[in-house]
Image: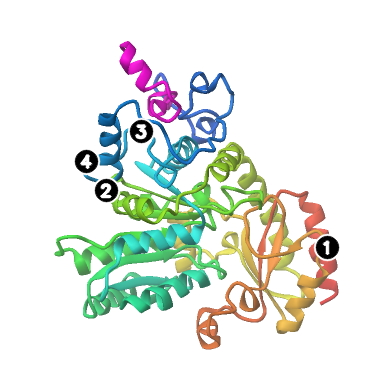
Amino acid sequence: MNEDEATMTGVPGRGRKMANQTTSIGNRRLHPSTLMMGHGYDPTLSEGALKPPIFLTSTFVFESAAEGKRFFEGVTGVRPGGSEGLVYGRFNGPGQEILEDRLALWEDAEEALTFSSGMSAIATVFLALVKPGDVIVHSAPLYAATETLIGRILGKLGVTWLDFPAGATGEEIEAVITAAKTKGRIAAIYLESPANPTNALVDVEAVYAARAKVLGGEDELPPIIIDNTFLGPLGAQPAKQGADLVIYSLTKYVGGHSDLVAGGCVGSAKAMLPVRMMRNTIGTITDPHTAWMLLRSLETLELRMSRAGENAAKVCAMLRNHPKVERVGYLGFLEPGTRQHDIYTRHCVGAGSTFSVIVKGGEAEAFRLLDNLKLVKLAVSLGGTESLASHPAAMTHLSVPAARKAELGITDTLVRVSIGVEHPDDLIADFEQALDAV
């Protein structure tokens, strides 16, 4: 490297993609959990700081006018390949780029983008793909805000939708895609698996096959997009089953400490390009401080999710046999031979730590359970170090019409639980005393 090249790549962010990108030792490929400790960051570019600093700046200085032009050509899509350097806080930043490099590693994706929230990730993706008159095919149920975005917000733009139940067979999915085709151009096939809050799984392989069968003759196939928040990149990697874009609320397991709000999307460079261009336009990028906090969280993601998963298995084993519990919607309890179990064995590598508890009785009994928990906090969200419980029908999915909630199985007796990293015996004792009061 000559002196000019060293100058150009010596600024954090400009040469960062050349720094510390080793992903193997000899023939051994390093695990993502190892790479989270330093991938994409060279301490010598930041005064020797062991961890990446927080770069609180809105704009970046160019070495020359020609460099500024070249960077903007990449940011605006005039030239393929994206920006070669840092331009402006709405487009990129050192911390965000390091974060995105590391986030992509978990699923061996070509690219990752991060956003100001999970919903801003979903909204940015849809805005990048849809136009008036388009149709969105999606699984059901979805997170209530996602349903609102599709049905009410995009509906104002003339976008319509058709859905199929999360556990639908290949033939059922084919029928819905075929019906959607008659209504307009299918802009996207959007999935949520496990579904919020029922934990029902979607057969991504069946969706991929149905898309090929019904739309195989099209010049361009609609992307398969999936919200994988409930299981995270450790529990499922939907791209391996055919998903083109995988979306996360990074607020949940990836952030993992209930102290930030962010979203993410990973996928192929081709699928991500229109999303990147839309994010550049509307400015839904993660802020520098949140990016720094997510870098902290990624270092312990595997440890936290593993411990929470082990805890959830023990708590669910108790809840399953409790006389005041009708059923536990936990992936580890799926009956062998059923379609859901078949999907689980093909798609998932763990049951996760978020599940539903269906209590006997009605809303009053569900509320008494929630009100009497002491260690488990009554709050929405999931995936944090602490255990949380909430009532979807009256809280996160309150805006969903009653008939729709009944159709989707979001009942007054359903309590959603997210198990954290506390001692499992203490969590079991808490649920036992709370159920005694139901």
Magenta residues?
A: 1-24
C-alpha separation, residue under disc 3 versus residue under disc 2: 20 Å
| In this view, the mark in front (3 or 1) | 3
Residue on which the image places disc 4: 79
Residue name at image x 51 percent, y 63 percent: 336
Q: Quarter of the image containing the C terminus?
A: bottom right
Q: Quarter of the image containing the N terminus?
A: top left
Q: In terms of sequence position, does the residue under pointer 4 or pointer 2 come before the other? A: 4
Residue name at image x 45 percent, y 50 percent: 285
C-alpha separation, residue under disc 3 versus residue under disc 4: 13 Å
Residue on which the image places disc 3: 85
C-alpha separation, residue under disc 3 versus residue under disc 1: 50 Å
Q: Position of residue 61 (x, y in %)?
A: 40, 31
- Residue 40, image quadrant: top left
Q: In terms of sequence position, does the residue under pointer 1 or pointer 4 come before the other? A: 4
Q: In this orientation, does residue 161 appear?
A: no
Q: In terms of sequence position, does the residue under pointer 3 or pointer 2 come before the other? A: 3
Q: Residues within 10 Å of mark 3 (few under 14, many from 20)?
A: many
* Colour scheme employed for the rendering of this structure: rainbow
